[in-house]
Image (spheres, grey):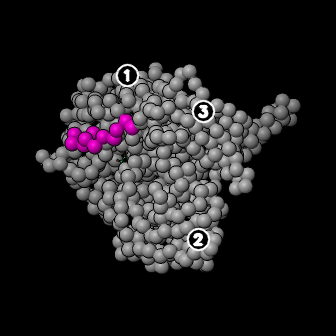
Amino acid sequence: MKKWLAFLLVFLLLIGVSAAAAGPAQQDAEREKRIAWWREARFGMFIHWGLYALPAGEWNGQPIPGIGEWIMNRAKIPVSQYEKLAQQFNPVKFNADEWVAVAKAAGMKYIVITSKHHDGFAMYGSKVSKYNIVDATPFHRDPMKELAEAAKKAGLKFGFYYSQTQDWHEYDGNGNTWDWPENDPKRDFAKYFESKCKPQVKEILTGYGPLAEVWFDTPRNISKEMSLELVKMVHDLNPMCLVDGRVGNGVGDYDSAGDNQISAGNFKRDWETPVTLNDTWGFKKDDHNWKSAAVLVRQLAQVAGRNGNYLLNVGPTAEGVIPAESVERLADVGKWMAVNGESIYGTSGSPLPYDFPWGAITVKPGKVYLHMFEWPSEDFTIFGLKTKVKTAYLLADASHKELWMKQEHDLKIDHHSLTLKLPRTAPDAKDSVIVLETAGAQDWNNGLLQQPDGSITLPASLGGVHAPEGAKQELRIDTRGVAEHWTNPKEWMNWEFRTSAPGRFNLVIVTSMQKDARDWEGGHDVKVHIDGLNPAGKDLEGIISDDARLQNPSNPYWPYVESRIGTVDLNRAASYVLTLKPESIEAAKKLGFTLVSVRLVPTTR
Ligand code: FHN
């Protein structure tokens, strides 16, 4: 054999071997590259735009309850009627540059827009199906081309939403049970997947420049092979394009929290939460339940404080206009971001895994950002930061004037505290950010500590969950950090915590209602035992009853309920273990004991 031929063969063999060895480590490395911009970005714009913006929540003169883009499903509109909307869809006021400017002014770094939602209508020029904005409407333009261009020009990342499983326009798609019976054995999802879903995903990946991400949604019972096929197609055609978690079967590049769920659970991976500005995603003319700019800023800070991304939705009208109420609020968020963006972009979540009554924490190497939603009337103290703070200042103060501070370590109980003197008035009532510049790598005591206001909160998400030996554990903590499927009284939870200011406490148990306060189940008989009491106290026993409602600003769709169980004396600054064991659980509604937290609140407060 000629020498050069032998070299060539060895060379080709080596390439083959290394390609075959592209195992999990290499895949992880590729994912790290893809996701770097997204971690830095933290804040994006979601856009739900489609034919549903025309009826805008009303069909045959009747208001249709629920989210706007679901009107076809909720009103059971036959395909033959819904299709006709396309003939009237003419968004003459659409201006891609204006939309992008709204996102940019808000401080958003990426845009994700519906290329095809569950109604099956492609909002881009598709060759795969004539049911698309270029071929089926009098508009005849491809607004997605214009938007992709405008985003690129403005330096924003651009991606597409694509509904891969539900397609109410297609016989073989998933979800339309009013035109075709659900159990019709001839309906064949695999056929839909091959003939529409895959070819359309290929179209969006190849016709609009490099995409930043494809945002799949409602995987339902899509098989793992199908989810993997979509992921592979995206990465093959565009290696830097992210795939969201809702591609299904846990194979996306990052996880997705439920809609409007500001997660408190323990996501191990990168995650994002999609949030509505009012209650709907697609435009609905009667939905005026707008979140205030303060709520939006606080949610953004809270999500960043839990290491996540915040994807905030706008639902433009059928004319192509982002509602003025949305634009106003986003402009306000943008004003806040212009001053405080440093405390959001490129930050990591709080090293302390629990919530604070006053706000949230984000961090960067050498800096801690305290997001103050509530401005203290006196000095402000936090516990647990062991690293020396060099200086503290308000982010809104361009001169970085040093705030007076005192940092202490009580050796006896190994307790770290930092106290700051703040000006009387908050620089921004929505969220005033205090910067702590730290010396060297940050070190925190991240155990459960009594807080400076004297209270102790033991969140369900940080408790130990125990099932009887040999039994399968049903109780789970959902992504909001709430216990679900706790219907078996033999399952129990416990927490270890430390106090620094002994005293008498009211013991309160916080549970969550279902979304929109639709339902709640109480009446459970619970027992609380605390190890470490001196002298040993009696166990507390009480009923989970609706004693008071709590404001839940970060998750406003899920109100909380407080149940007062009794009082307890924690006489020493010490470590304790609290055990919560139900004696019985009411589960007729199958909701059971939806624990959010156990709280110990000083009786003097
Ligand atoms: O059904 C959709 C809904 O219409 C909307 O698109 C949201 C956005 O996250 N996703 C689905 C429900 O989770």
Q: What residue sits right under mark 2 in the picture?
A: 530
Left-right relation of 279 to 562: left
Residue labelled with disc 3 = 404
Element type where label 2 sits in the image: strand
Q: Residues within 10 Å of mark 3 (few under 14, many from 20)?
A: few
The mark closer to the camera, 2 or 3, is 3
Give coordinates of residue 206: x percent, y percent: 48, 32
* Cα–Cα span, label 1 and label 3: 46 Å
Of residues 156 and 31, the one drawn nearer to the viewer in this rendering: 156
Label 2 within 8 A of ligand 1 by Cβ:
no
Label 1 C-beta lies within 8 Å of the nearest ligand 1 atom: no
Magenta-highlighted residues: 283-294
In this image, 603 relative to 283: left or right? Answer: right
User: Is 505 part of what is drawn in magenta?
Assistant: no
Q: Residues within 10 Å of mark 1 (few under 14, many from 20)?
A: some
Residue type (three-letter) at the residue carrying disc 1: Asp
Q: Is residue 188 above or below residue 158?
A: below
Magenta stretch, main secondary structure, is: loop
Point out the image quarter for the N terminus.
top right
Residue of label 1:
97
On the question of residue 204 being in view, the answer is no
What whole-number distance in Å separates the C-alpha atoms at marks 2 and 3? Answer: 39 Å
Q: Residue at x 57, y 59 (%)?
A: 462
Q: Residue at x 71, y 53 (%)?
A: 414
